[in-house]
Image (cartoon, rainbow, N blue to C red):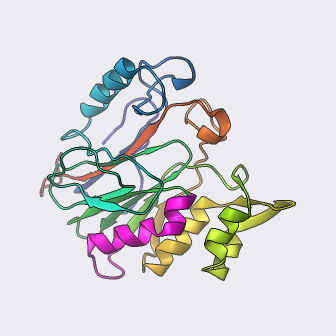
Amino acid sequence: MKAPYDWIVPDWLAPSRVKCLITTRNGGGSAGGYASFNLGLRTGGDEAAVHANRQLLRAWLPQDPKWLRQMHAADVVVADGLAGIPEADASIARNAGTVCAVMIADCLPVLLCDRTGSVVGIAHAGWRSLSSGVIENTVGMMGAARGELLAYLGPAIGPHAFEVGRDVHDAFVTHDPAAAIAFTPYRQGKWLADLFRLARLRLARCGIDQVFGGGLCTYDNPARFYSHRRDKVTGRMAALIWLGSDNGQG
């Protein structure tokens, strides 16, 4: 797949049947702080523009995405046959053409698939979801044997920009002292947190050693990415993953 504009097609060792796409802020019709490819209906941006942007995205997908009402928690749903918009921060699919999707604007999208291309999953991994076990829950729902999954880390707020307090630090370190390696002391009672590293630690504990991506900072690149931490009022991008047909097409 060759994406339009500067959208991201993950480069990883996924089977050819696994398709994925991550939009950026470019290519749509939203204006102001939401310019231009805002896909979020809960951001305060013009809804007609969002719907038009979603229609543009739809042209690159086999079906409408299975959107979620993200709650910064760890609930996972099966997207196959899903009706409505459930409260969840992750989804999985085994049927060809079912598009799993999460919205992002600093939180980390984690894309997952198995080595045979029989199941895909995606998780919206901000610090709350990550510390609550959204990766572990998604992996468990996928049901693949240990060592059979691959992961791709999409754009998120980078480790030099994500200043956090003791609540975030302790949410990880209290239960896993090894997570301290992902926190750099910054000033009194504050740390710089590395979401990419925290996700890699969680993935490793799930037996996933093939992890790709990571390092694209949403905060640092206002021309390409929305960032809630940077701009407060802003749009949302989408990360999407699905299975094509058995012959690797579509």
Q: Residue furthest right?
A: 188
Residue in view at x 63 percent, y 37 percent: 221
Residue 249 located left or right of residue 28:
left
Magenta: main secondary structure equals helix
Q: Is residue 49 visible?
A: yes
Q: Quadrant of the N terminus?
A: top left
Residue in view at x 51 percent, y 22 percent: 35
Q: State the image quarter where residue 16 is shown.
A: bottom left
Residue in view at x 15 percent, y 57 percent: 95
Q: Quadrant of the C terminus?
A: top left
Q: As displayed, is residue 44 above or below residue 9?
A: above
Q: As displayed, is residue 74 above or below residue 46?
A: below
Residue 221 located left or right of residue 86:
right
Task: Residue 249: give x, y in percent of width and height.
Answer: 16, 48
Viewer-proximal residue among 28 and 15: 28
Task: Residue 147: give x, y in percent of width and height.
Answer: 36, 80
Task: Residue 56: give x, y in percent of width and height.
Answer: 30, 26
Q: Which residues are magenta?
A: 127-149
Residue 197 located left or right of residue 83:
right
Viewer-proximal residue among 54 and 69: 69
Task: Residue 141: give x, y in percent of width and height.
Answer: 29, 70
Q: As displayed, is residue 74 above or below residue 48?
A: below
Q: Is residue 15 visible?
A: no
